[in-house]
Image: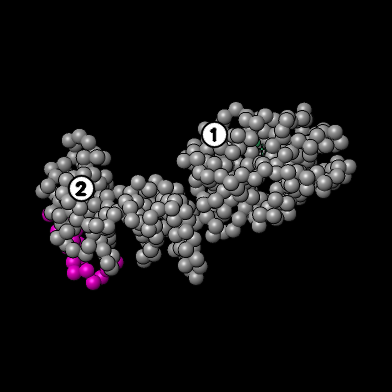
């Protein structure tokens, strides 16, 4: 091992995409992205972000390379690299680059096979004395003779040595970990996601979070008709989604009294539709308290009886806010693939019933009519039932499960 050439610990170099397109709002979006990155990495000594042209540099007094995966979970990030920081000094670069390539080869490409290799130089600092192409050639001369396993392949390189020439330093790195892209959470406002224990609603939440929405969660819990494992399951799902945004709140709302009233006083075929209308009403009240401006559900067209356009129209009428349904045109297989990708599928498929199954009608109405739903509800004291349930909600503040 050679002595460390640079006293500066490795940093994270962040590439971001779409927020670059937002014209005059760009500084605001960048500020939110920087803040979200800092929150995702946690309190670390000297943690700070610097905005470079088209990039964000995250620095600290410690080596940030172990935090690469966390940064890659921040919406707005296209890709991230852990980079070594070198002075603007060619001699240092030519000494360090072959070492770094050797270390990475040993670690990531065990064996004796050839590894397709290239060098990429990015030179935003135009005062740097060597042009990009000259530097690529000079670096190749410094690196290639030290390793007989490297073969140049510009198009399909598996190992790419990259040098970023900045105003005050050189950044040297070999990997880009893809991020989730999208927009930074909090840049688009707040939503309230109706989170069941199923496969769909966590995916719906994730998709809106990816588009920059800060998400709160509300879940309806019909204790004692439904056991505590259903509540636990929803908490675990919300914890899993909490990894994707800075702060996550989950409101668990007691739903049994409302369901019993509907069972006792309303026509049986309308039960499910009325449960859903009750959820919309309570979610709207909670959304208003929490300054959320939209409700998000995991509904998709035709998936179950309550998801015909007739029933969805009757259900949505009970909401004070726009209802966003990001899965509306997706097949179940597509939703499942997404759930696997974002890591919620295994939690969603744990066995635990949802409150919608409580007192489930034999023949639920498929083409509900608003006037019939309103007439059915007219016998209930909806205001009191709604207010009491929302007042009795249990609010949990969740840390990511990671
Ligand atoms: P999911 O996989 O999300 O449960 P699903 O296909 O089972 O979806 P439904 O049970 O018809 O769909 O529910 C439709 C939507 O209503 C859910 O995606 C969710 O947004 C909301 N919802 C259902 N049950 C609850 C609940 N107990 N608490 C909060 N929201 C719920
Ligand atoms: Mg469900």
Q: Measuring 70% from the left and 48% from the top, which residue is drawn there? A: 283
Q: Is 116 left or right of 31, judged from the image as shown?
A: left
Left or right of 84, for residue 55: right
> Does ligand 1 reach within 8 Å of label 1's beta carbon?
no
Q: Residue 142 in the image: state x and y as whole percent.
A: 13, 54
Question: Where's the N terminus, which quadrant?
Answer: top left
Q: Position of residue 290 (x, y in %)?
A: 66, 54
Q: Circle 1 sits in a helix, a strand or a loop, which is it?
A: helix
Where residue 347 is drawn, which disc sits there? 1
Q: Relative to residue 183, is residue 69 drawn left or right?
A: left
At x 29%, y 54%, the residue is 9
Q: Which residue is mark 2?
A: 101
Residue nearest the viewer, comparing 363 with 352: 352
Q: Can you say whether 286 is above or below 201 in the image?
A: below
Residue 391 can be seen, yes or no: yes
Kindly check if marks 2 and 1 are in contact, taking CB atoms under 8 A apart as contact. no
- Residue 328 appears anywhere in the view: no
Magenta range: 124-141
Secondary structure beneath label 2:
helix
Q: Tell which circle, 2 or 1, labels the residue nearer the N-terminal end.
A: 2
In-image side of 41 versus 121 (left or right): right
Label 1: few (<14), some or many (≥20) within 10 Å?
A: some
Tell me the crowding category of disc 2: few under 14, some 14 to 19, or many 20 or more residues within 10 angstroms, Cα based: many
Depth check, front residue: 11 or 175: 11
Residue placed most toward the observer, 266 or 6 = 6
């Amino acid at each position: 091992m050679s002595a460390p050439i640079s006293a500066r610990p490795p940093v994270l170099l962040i590439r971001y995409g779409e927020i670059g397109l937002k014209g005059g709002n760009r500084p605001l979006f960048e500020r939110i992205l920087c803040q979200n990155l800092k929150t995702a990495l946690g309190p670390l000594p000297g943690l700070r972000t610097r905005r470079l042209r088209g990039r964000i540099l995250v620095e600290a007094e410690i080596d940030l390379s172990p935090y690469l995966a966390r940064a890659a979970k921040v919406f707005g990030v296209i890709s991230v690299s852990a980079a070594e920081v070198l002075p603007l000094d060619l001699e240092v670069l030519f000494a360090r680059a072959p070492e770094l390539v050797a270390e990475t080869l040993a670690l990531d490409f065990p064996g004796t096979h050839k590894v397709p290799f290239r060098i990429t130089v990015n030179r935003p600092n135009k005062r740097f004395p060597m042009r990009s192409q000259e530097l690529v050639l000079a670096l190749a001369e410094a690196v290639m003779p030290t390793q007989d396993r490297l073969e140049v392949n510009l198009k399909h390189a598996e190992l790419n040595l990259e040098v970023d020439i900045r105003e005050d330093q050189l950044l040297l790195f070999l990997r880009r970990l893809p991020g989730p892209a999208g927009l930074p959470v909090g840049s688009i406002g707040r939503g309230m996601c109706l989170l069941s224990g199923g496969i769909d609603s966590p995916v719906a939440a994730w998709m809106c979070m990816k588009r920059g929405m800060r998400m709160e969660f509300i879940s309806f819990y019909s204790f004692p008709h439904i056991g505590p494992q259903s509540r636990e399951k929803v908490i675990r799902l919300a914890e899993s989604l909490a990894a994707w945004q800075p702060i996550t709140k989950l409101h668990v709302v007691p739903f049994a009294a409302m369901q019993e009233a509907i069972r006792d006083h309303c026509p049986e075929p309308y039960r499910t539709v009325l449960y859903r209308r009750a959820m919309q009403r309570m979610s709207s009240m909670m959304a208003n308290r929490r300054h959320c401006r939209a409700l998000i559900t995991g509904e998709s067209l035709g998936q179950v009886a309550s998801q015909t356009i007739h029933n969805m129209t009757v259900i949505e009428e009970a909401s004070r806010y726009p209802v966003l349904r990001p899965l509306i045109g997706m097949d179940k297989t597509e939703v499942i693939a997404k759930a696997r990708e974002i890591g919620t599928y295994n939690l969603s498929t744990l066995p635990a019933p949802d409150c919608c199954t409580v007192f489930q009608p034999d023949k639920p109405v498929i083409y509900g009519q608003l006037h019939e739903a309103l007439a059915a509800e007219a016998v209930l004291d909806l205001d009191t039932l709604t207010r009491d349930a929302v007042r009795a909600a249990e609010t949990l503040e969740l840390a990511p499960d990671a």
